[in-house]
Image: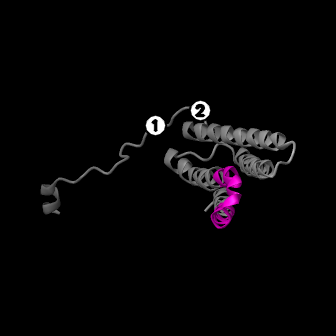
Amino acid sequence: MDWLVRAFIKSSVSWLALGVVIGIAMGVHPAWTVYRAAHLHTMLLGFVTMMIFGVAYHVIPRFAGHPLHSRRAALAHWWLANAGLALMVAGFIYRANGAPQTGTLLGAGGVLSGIGAYVFAYLIWRTIDGPSGRRAAAPVALIAQPVPIRARAQR
């Protein structure tokens, strides 16, 4: 498994663990449901989306038959996505506690996460198109053709 894929999947599992902690805390202490926005973003943007990013970076180049368009941009995507989410989760937690200036954290986190998502979309698009920017010719047999029953009997 590639180091980049591993980084996204490990991030995903780490966000899952944090999300579970927040979820259990809300269940044990119902007043802590004020943290549900942090829990939601931890689980959806952290666990689910990071897992999708990691799996996509593993699978799409293989399906497309082309290497990932830019590994440096993918690394930047990892940093943008994780830093943006960390700022957003912190912003939601501070907002629940009535701290001032949480809009700055939430805004910065949202912008970083959004830029990361656009980098991902660009990389996947360019990877599918291949190095020359054009779609490669499809292999002749993408799906194995079923063998007729009569031909099986003659083998």
| SS for dot 1 | loop
Q: Quadrant of residue 70?
A: top right
In this picture, residue 117 sits left or right of residue 137 = right
| SS for dot 2 | loop
Image quarter in which the N terminus is found: bottom right
Provide the residue span drawn in magenta: 17-42
The residue to which callout 1 is attached is 137
Q: Is residue 26 magenta?
A: yes
Question: Does the residue at mark 2 contact the one at mark 1 (Cβ under 8 Å)?
Answer: no
The residue to which callout 2 is attached is 133
The percent position of residue 129, horizontal first and vertical second, equals 56, 36
Question: Can residue 103 be spotted in the picture?
Answer: yes
In this picture, residue 149 sits left or right of residue 56 = left
Q: Residues within 10 Å of mark 2 (few under 14, many from 20)?
A: few
Near-viewer residue (141 or 119): 119
Image quarter in which the C terminus is found: bottom left
Disc 1 marks a residue whose amino acid type is Ala
